[in-house]
């Protein structure tokens, strides 16, 4: 299974990707996780990525494509993979197609998780991350037992610079302008299916699994 999860920031791609990766025993390739690790480690790529992420802008294609290409070349991806956060633009999609074609591979499905804009803003601005272990909480949906304190390690919970309302609104505008055309791109190729991202994590996962198994349209 070679799958792409599409959707605006905050629709739950990461969570659903983790669940699907575990269910189908395929690696999840999250460019967001890789880039944040680079930011924490203050690598040259991380410094460049942070400047873009703090402003709600997309990280340059050359940085993202290089990371993904290297990952797809690893043995762990030989039997399939789930891409979360890539591609984000049509040129990236074209690059991905070229990478796969060179390997004699094709995509099986592109799943677009759809959630109303205001719901996304509410989700993202309420997120809090542990400054030590990176555990994620939400002030409304999954609050810590003690306000501002991580349940796991006792570290301080902070709001990521890219989760302020101004930055979130900017990220969504960037998505709608540069990334949403991917929906058209993959729909025209008969690969895209829409999934309602509202409701519980379990319900959204069930919709995706039914879609992938061919037993329903989500």
Image: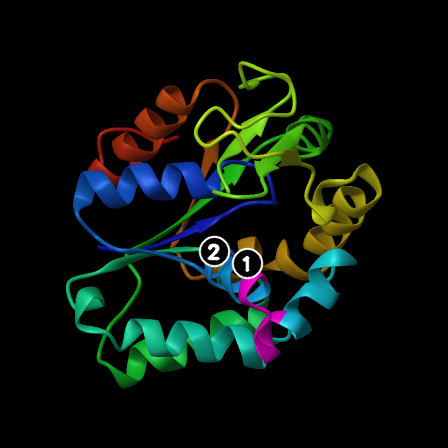
**Figure coloring:** rainbow
Residue under label 1: 36
Residue 135's spot in the image, x, y percent?
A: 48, 37
Furthest toward the right, the residue is 166
Left or right of 176 in this view: 183? left
- In the picture, which quadrant includes the N terminus? bottom left
Number of marks: 2
The span from disc 1 to disc 2 (Cα, nearest Å) is 5 Å
Q: Is residue 59 visible?
A: no
- Vertical side of 186 occupied by 139: above or below: above
> Please, what secondary structure does the residue beneath circle 2 have?
helix
Q: Which residues are magenta?
A: 40-46
Q: Nearer the viewer, residue 28 or 111?
A: 28
- Vertical side of 166 occupied by 118: above or below: above
Left or right of 46 in this view: 28? left
Q: Residue at x 50, y 61 (%)?
A: 37
Q: Residue at x 34, y 42 (%)?
A: 18
Furthest toward the front, the residue is 154
Residue 149's spot in the image, x, y percent?
A: 59, 25
In the rendered structure, are the residues bearing label 1 and label 2 in contact, judged by CB atoms less than 8 Å apart? yes
Crowd band around label 2 with a 10 angstrom C-alpha radius: few (<14), some (14–19), many (20+): few
> Please, what secondary structure does the residue beneath circle 1 have?
helix
Residue 193's spot in the image, x, y percent?
A: 42, 43
Whether 121 is among the magenta residues is no
**Label disc, if present, on residue 148 of the rendered structure:** none
Residue under label 2: 33
């Amino acid at each position: 299974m070679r799958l792409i999860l599409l959707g605006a920031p905050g629709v739950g791609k990461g969570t659903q990707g983790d669940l699907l990766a575990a269910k189908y025993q395929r690696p999840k390739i999250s460019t967001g996780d890789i880039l944040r690790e680079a930011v924490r480690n203050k690598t040259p790529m991380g410094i460049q990525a942070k400047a873009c992420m703090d402003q709600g802008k997309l990280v340059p294609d050359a940085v993202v494509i290089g990371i993904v290409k290297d990952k797809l070349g690893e043995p762990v991806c030989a039997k399939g993979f789930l891409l979360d956060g890539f591609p984000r633009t049509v040129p990236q999609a074209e690059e991905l197609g070229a990478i796969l074609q060179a390997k004699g591979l094709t995509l099986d499905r592109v799943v677009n998780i759809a959630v109303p804009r205001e719901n996304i803003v509410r989700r993202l601005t309420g997120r809090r991350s542990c400054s030590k272990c990176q555990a994620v909480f939400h002030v409304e949906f999954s609050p810590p037992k003690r306000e501002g304190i991580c349940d796991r390690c006792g570290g301080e919970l902070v709001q990521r610079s890219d989760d302020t309302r101004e930055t979130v609104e900017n990220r969504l505008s960037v998505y709608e302008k540069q990334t949403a055309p991917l929906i058209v791109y993959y729909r025209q190729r008969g690969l895209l299916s829409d999934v309602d991202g509202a409701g519980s994590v379990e319900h959204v996962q069930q919709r995706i699994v039914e879609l992938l198994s061919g037993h329903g349209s989500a």
